[in-house]
Amino acid sequence: MAISRKILTLDEFTIQQYRTIPNATGELSSLLRDIGLAAKRVNVQVNKAGLADILGYDGTTNIQGEDVMKLDVFANNQFMNVLKHGISCAGCASEEMDDIVIFDDEISNNSKYVVMFDPVDGSNNIDVNISIGTIFGVYKRKSKIGGPCTKEDFLQSGINQVAAGYVVYGSSTMLVYATRRGVNGFTLDPSIGEFCLSHPDIKCPEHGKIYSVNHGNFFQYEDFVKKYITACQEKTKANGGPYSQRYFGSMVADLHRNLIKGGIFMYPTTADNRNGKLRMQYECNPFAFIVEVAGGKATNGKERILDLHPTELHQRTPVFIGSKAMVEELESFI
Ligand code: AHG
Ligand code: MN
Ligand code: MN
Ligand code: MN
Protein backbone atom coordinates (compact mmCIF):
# COMPACT_ATOMS: atom_id res chain seq x y z
CA MET A 1 0.00 0.00 0.00
CA ALA A 2 1.37 3.41 -0.94
CA ILE A 3 2.02 5.66 2.02
CA SER A 4 0.98 9.24 1.36
CA ARG A 5 3.59 11.99 1.64
CA LYS A 6 3.86 13.16 5.20
CA ILE A 7 2.86 16.76 5.67
CA LEU A 8 4.39 18.26 8.79
CA THR A 9 2.14 19.89 11.33
CA LEU A 10 3.17 23.18 12.94
CA ASP A 11 4.19 21.35 16.12
CA GLU A 12 6.22 18.73 14.26
CA PHE A 13 7.94 21.41 12.20
CA THR A 14 8.90 23.63 15.13
CA ILE A 15 10.17 20.64 17.13
CA GLN A 16 12.29 19.51 14.18
CA GLN A 17 13.68 23.03 13.89
CA TYR A 18 14.71 23.32 17.51
CA ARG A 19 16.35 19.91 17.53
CA THR A 20 18.86 21.23 14.99
CA ILE A 21 19.86 24.18 17.23
CA PRO A 22 22.48 23.44 19.91
CA ASN A 23 21.35 24.36 23.45
CA ALA A 24 17.78 25.17 22.34
CA THR A 25 15.24 24.52 25.07
CA GLY A 26 12.11 24.15 22.93
CA GLU A 27 10.50 27.21 24.52
CA LEU A 28 10.00 28.92 21.17
CA SER A 29 8.33 25.80 19.73
CA SER A 30 6.05 25.74 22.71
CA LEU A 31 5.25 29.43 22.30
CA LEU A 32 4.36 28.95 18.63
CA ARG A 33 2.12 26.05 19.57
CA ASP A 34 0.34 28.29 22.08
CA ILE A 35 -0.17 30.96 19.42
CA GLY A 36 -1.50 28.29 17.05
CA LEU A 37 -3.99 27.20 19.70
CA ALA A 38 -5.27 30.73 20.26
CA ALA A 39 -5.52 31.21 16.49
CA LYS A 40 -7.67 28.08 16.21
CA ARG A 41 -10.00 29.34 18.92
CA VAL A 42 -10.33 32.73 17.22
CA ASN A 43 -10.85 30.99 13.88
CA VAL A 44 -13.85 29.11 15.28
CA GLN A 45 -15.49 32.39 16.25
CA VAL A 46 -14.60 34.10 12.97
CA ASN A 47 -16.24 31.24 11.06
CA LYS A 48 -19.39 31.60 13.15
CA ALA A 49 -19.54 35.39 12.75
CA GLY A 50 -23.09 36.27 11.80
CA LEU A 51 -24.47 33.27 13.70
CA ALA A 52 -22.87 33.71 17.10
CA ASP A 53 -23.08 37.04 18.91
CA ILE A 54 -19.60 38.11 17.91
CA LEU A 55 -20.25 40.80 15.29
CA GLY A 56 -20.37 44.49 16.00
CA TYR A 57 -19.02 46.95 18.49
CA ASP A 58 -18.18 46.26 22.08
CA GLY A 59 -19.18 49.79 23.08
CA THR A 60 -15.77 50.87 24.35
CA THR A 61 -12.87 52.83 22.85
CA ASN A 62 -9.27 51.59 22.98
CA ILE A 63 -6.03 53.43 23.72
CA GLN A 64 -5.66 54.04 19.97
CA GLY A 65 -8.89 56.06 19.99
CA GLU A 66 -10.68 53.39 17.94
CA ASP A 67 -14.09 51.82 18.58
CA VAL A 68 -13.48 48.31 19.88
CA MET A 69 -15.23 45.35 18.23
CA LYS A 70 -16.45 42.31 20.20
CA LEU A 71 -14.01 40.13 18.28
CA ASP A 72 -11.09 42.40 19.24
CA VAL A 73 -11.85 41.69 22.89
CA PHE A 74 -12.43 37.97 22.38
CA ALA A 75 -9.21 37.49 20.40
CA ASN A 76 -7.19 39.64 22.79
CA ASN A 77 -8.30 37.45 25.71
CA GLN A 78 -7.62 34.21 23.85
CA PHE A 79 -4.06 35.19 22.94
CA MET A 80 -3.32 36.66 26.35
CA ASN A 81 -4.62 33.59 28.17
CA VAL A 82 -2.78 30.96 26.14
CA LEU A 83 0.43 32.95 26.57
CA LYS A 84 -0.19 33.21 30.29
CA HIS A 85 -0.91 29.51 30.70
CA GLY A 86 2.00 28.42 28.49
CA ILE A 87 5.55 27.96 29.71
CA SER A 88 7.37 30.35 27.38
CA CYS A 89 6.06 33.85 27.92
CA ALA A 90 6.74 36.24 30.80
CA GLY A 91 4.28 38.91 29.69
CA CYS A 92 2.56 40.47 26.73
CA ALA A 93 1.40 43.74 25.21
CA SER A 94 -1.35 44.30 22.69
CA GLU A 95 -2.90 46.99 20.54
CA GLU A 96 -6.06 46.62 22.62
CA MET A 97 -4.52 47.01 26.09
CA ASP A 98 -3.38 50.29 27.63
CA ASP A 99 -0.31 48.83 29.29
CA ILE A 100 1.86 45.72 29.32
CA VAL A 101 0.62 42.64 31.19
CA ILE A 102 3.23 41.06 33.46
CA PHE A 103 2.22 37.48 34.19
CA ASP A 104 4.36 37.29 37.35
CA ASP A 105 3.92 33.69 38.41
CA GLU A 106 6.68 31.16 38.97
CA ILE A 107 6.57 29.55 35.52
CA SER A 108 6.18 32.85 33.65
CA ASN A 109 9.01 34.51 35.57
CA ASN A 110 11.28 31.72 34.37
CA SER A 111 10.21 32.16 30.75
CA LYS A 112 12.51 33.65 28.14
CA TYR A 113 10.14 35.58 25.92
CA VAL A 114 7.67 38.43 25.76
CA VAL A 115 5.11 38.79 22.97
CA MET A 116 3.52 41.84 21.36
CA PHE A 117 0.41 41.33 19.26
CA ASP A 118 -2.43 42.82 17.28
CA PRO A 119 -5.25 40.38 18.13
CA VAL A 120 -7.50 41.32 15.21
CA ASP A 121 -6.04 43.25 12.33
CA GLY A 122 -8.63 44.72 9.97
CA SER A 123 -11.29 45.12 12.67
CA ASN A 124 -13.35 47.31 10.34
CA ASN A 125 -13.74 44.35 8.01
CA ILE A 126 -15.15 41.88 10.56
CA ASP A 127 -18.78 42.72 9.92
CA VAL A 128 -18.48 42.55 6.12
CA ASN A 129 -16.80 39.16 5.83
CA ILE A 130 -13.47 40.34 4.45
CA SER A 131 -10.25 38.61 5.51
CA ILE A 132 -8.88 39.69 8.86
CA GLY A 133 -5.79 38.60 10.77
CA THR A 134 -3.63 38.47 13.87
CA ILE A 135 -0.03 39.73 14.03
CA PHE A 136 2.64 38.88 16.62
CA GLY A 137 6.29 39.60 17.42
CA VAL A 138 8.39 37.62 19.90
CA TYR A 139 11.34 39.14 21.81
CA LYS A 140 13.85 37.65 24.19
CA ARG A 141 13.59 39.42 27.55
CA LYS A 142 16.23 41.92 28.62
CA SER A 143 15.21 41.63 32.27
CA LYS A 144 16.61 38.92 34.46
CA ILE A 145 15.05 35.48 34.16
CA GLY A 146 13.61 34.41 37.50
CA GLY A 147 11.78 37.68 38.14
CA PRO A 148 8.89 39.46 36.44
CA CYS A 149 9.40 41.02 32.99
CA THR A 150 9.64 44.81 32.69
CA LYS A 151 8.61 47.61 30.32
CA GLU A 152 12.14 47.61 28.89
CA ASP A 153 11.50 44.13 27.46
CA PHE A 154 8.78 45.62 25.28
CA LEU A 155 10.66 48.71 24.08
CA GLN A 156 13.12 46.86 21.88
CA SER A 157 13.91 47.49 18.23
CA GLY A 158 12.24 45.14 15.78
CA ILE A 159 15.63 43.74 14.81
CA ASN A 160 15.68 41.99 18.21
CA GLN A 161 12.67 39.84 17.35
CA VAL A 162 13.46 36.13 17.52
CA ALA A 163 10.29 35.28 15.65
CA ALA A 164 7.34 37.09 14.15
CA GLY A 165 4.26 35.96 12.37
CA TYR A 166 0.65 36.43 11.43
CA VAL A 167 -2.55 34.49 11.03
CA VAL A 168 -4.85 35.24 8.12
CA TYR A 169 -8.49 34.21 8.55
CA GLY A 170 -9.23 34.10 4.84
CA SER A 171 -10.62 31.69 2.27
CA SER A 172 -8.52 29.26 4.28
CA THR A 173 -6.88 30.04 7.61
CA MET A 174 -3.11 30.27 7.55
CA LEU A 175 -0.40 30.85 10.09
CA VAL A 176 2.85 32.22 8.69
CA TYR A 177 5.88 32.75 10.88
CA ALA A 178 9.49 33.74 10.44
CA THR A 179 12.65 33.15 12.38
CA ARG A 180 16.04 34.20 11.09
CA ARG A 181 16.19 30.82 9.34
CA GLY A 182 13.22 31.44 7.06
CA VAL A 183 9.53 32.09 6.60
CA ASN A 184 7.11 29.17 6.57
CA GLY A 185 3.34 29.05 6.06
CA PHE A 186 0.89 26.55 7.53
CA THR A 187 -2.70 26.07 6.39
CA LEU A 188 -5.30 25.00 8.92
CA ASP A 189 -6.74 21.61 7.98
CA PRO A 190 -10.15 21.85 9.65
CA SER A 191 -10.71 18.08 9.42
CA ILE A 192 -7.90 17.41 11.90
CA GLY A 193 -7.69 20.86 13.52
CA GLU A 194 -3.98 21.23 12.76
CA PHE A 195 -1.90 23.84 10.97
CA CYS A 196 -0.03 21.91 8.24
CA LEU A 197 3.07 23.07 6.38
CA SER A 198 1.75 24.21 2.99
CA HIS A 199 4.13 27.07 2.07
CA PRO A 200 7.71 26.10 2.98
CA ASP A 201 10.47 28.69 2.75
CA ILE A 202 8.44 31.64 1.45
CA LYS A 203 10.40 34.20 -0.58
CA CYS A 204 9.02 37.62 -1.48
CA PRO A 205 9.50 38.16 -5.25
CA GLU A 206 12.06 40.91 -5.87
CA HIS A 207 9.73 42.68 -8.31
CA GLY A 208 5.96 42.88 -8.22
CA LYS A 209 3.06 44.55 -9.97
CA ILE A 210 0.76 45.28 -7.05
CA TYR A 211 0.71 48.45 -4.98
CA SER A 212 -1.49 48.71 -1.90
CA VAL A 213 -2.33 52.08 -0.41
CA ASN A 214 -5.42 54.00 0.69
CA HIS A 215 -6.00 56.15 -2.40
CA GLY A 216 -8.63 58.17 -0.56
CA ASN A 217 -5.80 59.91 1.30
CA PHE A 218 -3.82 60.71 -1.86
CA PHE A 219 -3.91 64.49 -1.49
CA GLN A 220 -2.75 64.22 2.13
CA TYR A 221 0.44 62.33 1.24
CA GLU A 222 3.90 63.87 1.05
CA ASP A 223 5.19 64.72 -2.43
CA PHE A 224 7.49 61.72 -2.76
CA VAL A 225 4.58 59.37 -2.06
CA LYS A 226 2.36 61.12 -4.61
CA LYS A 227 5.15 60.89 -7.16
CA TYR A 228 5.69 57.18 -6.52
CA ILE A 229 1.96 56.40 -6.72
CA THR A 230 1.77 58.35 -9.98
CA ALA A 231 4.76 56.37 -11.29
CA CYS A 232 2.90 53.16 -10.39
CA GLN A 233 -0.11 54.36 -12.39
CA GLU A 234 2.08 55.25 -15.36
CA LYS A 235 3.76 51.83 -15.61
CA THR A 236 3.40 50.11 -18.97
CA LYS A 237 4.55 46.80 -20.38
CA ALA A 238 7.76 48.52 -21.41
CA ASN A 239 8.85 49.18 -17.80
CA GLY A 240 7.49 46.24 -15.86
CA GLY A 241 3.83 47.26 -15.73
CA PRO A 242 0.99 47.67 -15.86
CA TYR A 243 0.51 47.64 -12.07
CA SER A 244 -2.67 46.84 -10.17
CA GLN A 245 -3.87 48.68 -7.10
CA ARG A 246 -5.20 46.29 -4.43
CA TYR A 247 -6.25 47.38 -0.93
CA PHE A 248 -8.40 45.40 1.51
CA GLY A 249 -7.85 47.68 4.48
CA SER A 250 -6.56 44.64 6.41
CA MET A 251 -2.79 44.88 6.57
CA VAL A 252 -2.50 41.12 7.08
CA ALA A 253 -4.51 40.27 3.97
CA ASP A 254 -2.80 42.95 1.87
CA LEU A 255 0.69 41.95 2.95
CA HIS A 256 0.05 38.21 2.75
CA ARG A 257 -0.91 38.66 -0.91
CA ASN A 258 2.04 40.93 -1.64
CA LEU A 259 4.48 38.61 0.14
CA ILE A 260 3.39 35.69 -2.04
CA LYS A 261 2.82 37.50 -5.34
CA GLY A 262 5.20 40.43 -5.03
CA GLY A 263 4.07 43.97 -4.32
CA ILE A 264 4.41 47.02 -2.09
CA PHE A 265 2.19 48.04 0.83
CA MET A 266 2.23 51.64 2.06
CA TYR A 267 0.73 53.48 4.99
CA PRO A 268 2.32 56.94 4.72
CA THR A 269 2.08 59.99 6.92
CA THR A 270 -1.11 61.93 6.27
CA ALA A 271 -2.16 65.44 7.18
CA ASP A 272 -4.36 63.93 9.91
CA ASN A 273 -1.86 61.30 11.15
CA ARG A 274 1.62 62.84 11.28
CA ASN A 275 3.18 59.47 12.24
CA GLY A 276 1.02 57.41 9.94
CA LYS A 277 -1.56 55.09 11.41
CA LEU A 278 0.04 51.71 11.88
CA ARG A 279 1.56 50.63 15.16
CA MET A 280 5.32 50.03 15.23
CA GLN A 281 5.37 47.18 17.72
CA TYR A 282 2.18 45.28 16.87
CA GLU A 283 2.02 45.71 13.09
CA CYS A 284 5.13 47.17 11.43
CA ASN A 285 7.94 45.37 13.28
CA PRO A 286 6.54 41.85 12.87
CA PHE A 287 5.86 42.40 9.17
CA ALA A 288 9.22 44.11 8.60
CA PHE A 289 10.92 41.07 10.13
CA ILE A 290 8.92 38.57 8.05
CA VAL A 291 9.36 40.50 4.81
CA GLU A 292 13.10 41.03 5.34
CA VAL A 293 13.70 37.34 6.11
CA ALA A 294 11.77 36.61 2.89
CA GLY A 295 14.11 38.92 0.94
CA GLY A 296 12.03 42.11 0.88
CA LYS A 297 12.47 45.55 2.49
CA ALA A 298 10.67 47.77 4.98
CA THR A 299 11.30 51.47 5.66
CA ASN A 300 9.53 54.44 7.21
CA GLY A 301 10.87 56.58 4.35
CA LYS A 302 13.98 57.58 6.30
CA GLU A 303 15.12 54.53 8.22
CA ARG A 304 14.78 50.78 8.15
CA ILE A 305 11.74 49.87 10.26
CA LEU A 306 13.68 47.19 12.17
CA ASP A 307 16.27 49.74 13.35
CA LEU A 308 13.77 52.15 14.93
CA HIS A 309 13.92 52.47 18.73
CA PRO A 310 10.46 52.57 20.29
CA THR A 311 10.19 54.88 23.28
CA GLU A 312 6.61 54.03 24.18
CA LEU A 313 4.00 51.34 23.60
CA HIS A 314 1.47 52.08 20.88
CA GLN A 315 3.96 54.18 18.91
CA ARG A 316 3.05 54.71 15.26
CA THR A 317 5.20 54.93 12.17
CA PRO A 318 4.73 55.43 8.45
CA VAL A 319 5.59 52.24 6.57
CA PHE A 320 6.58 51.22 3.03
CA ILE A 321 7.12 47.48 2.80
CA GLY A 322 7.32 44.64 0.31
CA SER A 323 9.27 43.60 -2.77
CA LYS A 324 12.84 44.88 -2.62
CA ALA A 325 12.92 46.54 -6.04
CA MET A 326 9.61 48.32 -5.47
CA VAL A 327 10.63 49.73 -2.07
CA GLU A 328 13.92 50.87 -3.62
CA GLU A 329 12.08 52.61 -6.44
CA LEU A 330 9.93 54.40 -3.86
CA GLU A 331 13.11 55.43 -2.00
CA SER A 332 14.48 56.94 -5.20
CA PHE A 333 11.69 59.58 -5.03
CA ILE A 334 12.59 60.71 -1.49
P1 AHG B 1 -6.62 47.32 13.24
O1 AHG B 1 -7.88 46.71 12.74
O2 AHG B 1 -5.75 46.32 13.95
O3 AHG B 1 -6.84 48.56 14.06
O4 AHG B 1 -5.70 47.71 12.01
C1 AHG B 1 -6.28 48.45 10.96
C2 AHG B 1 -5.19 48.90 10.07
C3 AHG B 1 -4.67 47.89 9.06
O5 AHG B 1 -5.16 46.62 9.11
C4 AHG B 1 -5.05 48.49 7.73
O6 AHG B 1 -4.03 48.28 6.82
C5 AHG B 1 -5.30 49.92 8.01
O7 AHG B 1 -5.69 49.99 9.34
C6 AHG B 1 -6.35 50.50 7.13
O8 AHG B 1 -6.49 51.84 7.44
P2 AHG B 1 -7.30 52.84 6.48
O9 AHG B 1 -8.73 52.40 6.57
O10 AHG B 1 -7.04 54.18 7.08
O11 AHG B 1 -6.75 52.70 5.10
MN1 MN C 1 -7.56 48.74 15.91
MN1 MN D 1 -3.95 46.11 12.89
MN1 MN E 1 -6.22 45.27 15.72
Image (spheres, rainbow, N blue to C red):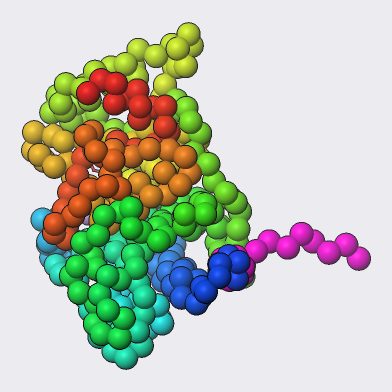
Residue most extreme to the right: 1
Q: Position of residue 33 (x, y in %)?
A: 49, 72
103, 121: nearer the viewer: 103
Q: Which residue is pictured at 30% across the width and 62% down the height?
A: 117
For residue 171, above or below residue 70: above
261, 141: nearer the viewer: 141
Q: Position of residue 190 (x, y in %)?
A: 57, 65
How many numbered discs sit on the rendered protein?
Answer: 0
Q: Which residue is pictured at 24% across the width and 68% down the height?
A: 153
Is-magenta flag for residue 9?
yes
The C terminus is located in which quarter? top left
- In-image side of 105 versus 31 (left or right): left
Q: Is residue 125 visible?
A: no
Q: Position of residue 273 (x, y in %)?
A: 11, 41
Q: Is residue 21 visible?
A: yes
Residue most extreme to the top: 238
Residue most extreme to the bottom: 106
Q: Position of residue 326 (x, y in %)?
A: 39, 27
The N terminus is located in which quarter? bottom right
- In-image side of 188 versus 243 (left or right): right
Residue most extreme to the front: 22
Q: Residue 213's quadrant in the figure? A: top left
Q: Residue 196's quadrant in the figure? A: bottom right
- In-image side of 320 versus 292 (left or right): left
Is-magenta flag for residue 209?
no
- In-image side of 189 versus 2 (left or right): left
Q: Which residue is pictured at 43% across the width and 33% down the height?
A: 323
40, 81: nearer the viewer: 81
Q: Which residues are magenta?
A: 1-16
